Amino acid sequence: MTPIFDLLASAPPVEADGGVAGEILRAFKIDWPYFISQCVSFLIVAILLKKFAFGPIQAMLEQRRNRIAEGEAKLKQIEQQLAESERTTAAAIAKANEDAARLINEAKTSAAALSEQKAQEAIASAQQILAKAEAAAAAERAAIKAELKAEFGRLVTATTAQVTGKVLTSDDQARINKEALASVEA
Amino acid sequence: MPRRTIFTILFAWLCCAAPAFAAAGGHDPLPAHAEEIFRLGPFVITNSMLMVWIVAAFIILVAQAATRKLSLIPSGLQNFVEWLVESLYNFLEGILGKHLVKRTFWFFGTIFVLILFTNWFGLIPGVGTLGWQLTGPGVEAHDKFRPWLRGGNADLNMTAAMSFTFALLWFYWAISENGLKGFLAHIFAPKGKFSGAMAVGMLVVFAFVGVLEIVSILFRPVALSFRLYGNIFAGENILENMMFVVGDTKWLAWLPPLPFYFLELLVGLIQALVFMLLTAVFLKLICDHGDHHDDEHDHAH
């Protein structure tokens, strides 16, 4: 019923050679063929496990570890680039603001000057146009006046000739015209 | 009742009932050693060796299945295997440091996983109970039954093979890390700075301590072998003996070992951890350049 006692009972009897160690070796069947066989078996198993079990898993873990390390390095690089980019952008924005303010000021100054210049030009041009118009009007008026005078003289001469019934000479016509005009102008 | 609970109970029943029925058929008490199944040239193939190969094949199959379709975001089996190996790696890295763990993880990982699953596989119904009967003249009455399989670590040759392989690797790693001079200095040289007569005295003291250290180093594989073997063989004995507690009420023989199966699951894990931890600490102590030399004796005992 109690195999352990049976086991001890079944252990080979203690021989004179070997003493206690020999007894232990015999009880547990430790001998060279068994031990060497187990050593070879264990080495084969360990090599197989290294090659086909731990090898692939470790390679997979190593790959993942490298990928994570690469990712972290890239992240750090990206963070640095981002910070650099932010600094560059901020500097560019500040410069752009400065340039824009300067340009606006310049534009304002330039626009004011141009506006003044254009206004002056417009005034000059208007005055020129006005002067020209006045000159044209004066010339037209003089022409009309001359035409009127000529017509008036012709009419006076014609009227005088009809009224007097004589043919007027050139001198008469000139004299009558002159007198008529003088009376009209007066 | 949830399906998982039913399966758990069924498995527990099988764990206990199958050996009970096998025992009812009448087979030999659990021997203290593994038994020969066949010979392959000069090599003896034992039932415990077969068990270790089955476990190794299982581990390789799981590892291959887990790494067949790798995905960036692991899930399922890949996730579990990655978690197991990575946890083990980080745990050993905490003991050995980054450099040593990179060199030696294949060994310590193998030791832990192989011992753990060999211990647990030894609890599967049929291991130690399924086999064949010897017949013919010369067969002893108490030794007629040959099981096909036996718990891998319930064989002192197996645990000794692991321990002595580690011992050889330990020498190789220790000398390659420290150099032969550094290795000997690590064992024999006085620790600390002394001068004059004190230095001479310390040389003598540390030479003696070095001799003790050598004895301790030589006995490590023996202690490692017997510790693991003793625990696992004792567990198998408990399970077997518990079945006989009920006497002639054989239909109830499955019940007494039941709590001990859970205990043995725990023992299997603890022993795998202890073996791996001790071997890792032994290596760390000889490769460590700090002043932690005295800790070795604590761990060794």
Image (tube, coloured by chain):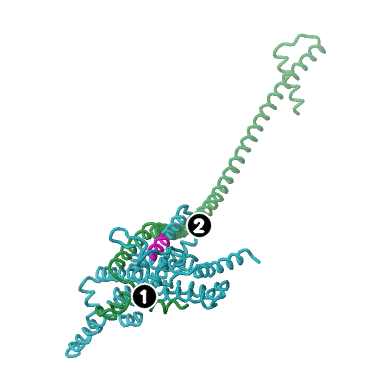
Chain colours: A green, B cyan
**Which quarter of the figure has residue A142?**
top right
Above or below — where is B156 with respect to B53? below
How far across and how far down the image is residue A17, in percent? Answer: 24, 78
**Which quarter of the figure has residue B154?**
bottom left
Query: Which comes sooner in the sequence, label 1 or label 2?
Result: 2
Q: Which residue is mark 2?
A: B73
Which class describes the residues within 10 Å of circle 2: few (<14), some (14-19), or many (20+)? few
Chain for disc number 1: B
How far across and how far down the image is residue B74, in percent? Answer: 50, 58
- Say which mark, if any, is on residue B57: none
Residue closer to the observer: B61 or B54: B54
- Say which mark, if any, is on residue B278: 1
Q: Is residue A80 visible?
A: no
Say whether residue A142 is left or right of residue B53. Answer: right
**Which quarter of the figure has residue B198?**
bottom left
Residue range of the region highlighted in magenta in the rendering? B47-56
Name the amino acid, label 2.
Answer: Ile
Q: Is residue B192 magenta?
A: no
The residues bearing labels 1 and 2 have C-alpha atoms spaced at a distance of 34 Å
Helix, strand or loop at label 2? It is loop
Q: Is residue B50 visible?
A: yes
Q: Is residue B50 magenta?
A: yes
Say whether residue B8 is left or right of residue A66. Answer: right
Helix, strand or loop at label 1? It is helix
Which class describes the residues within 10 Å of circle 1: few (<14), some (14-19), or many (20+)? some
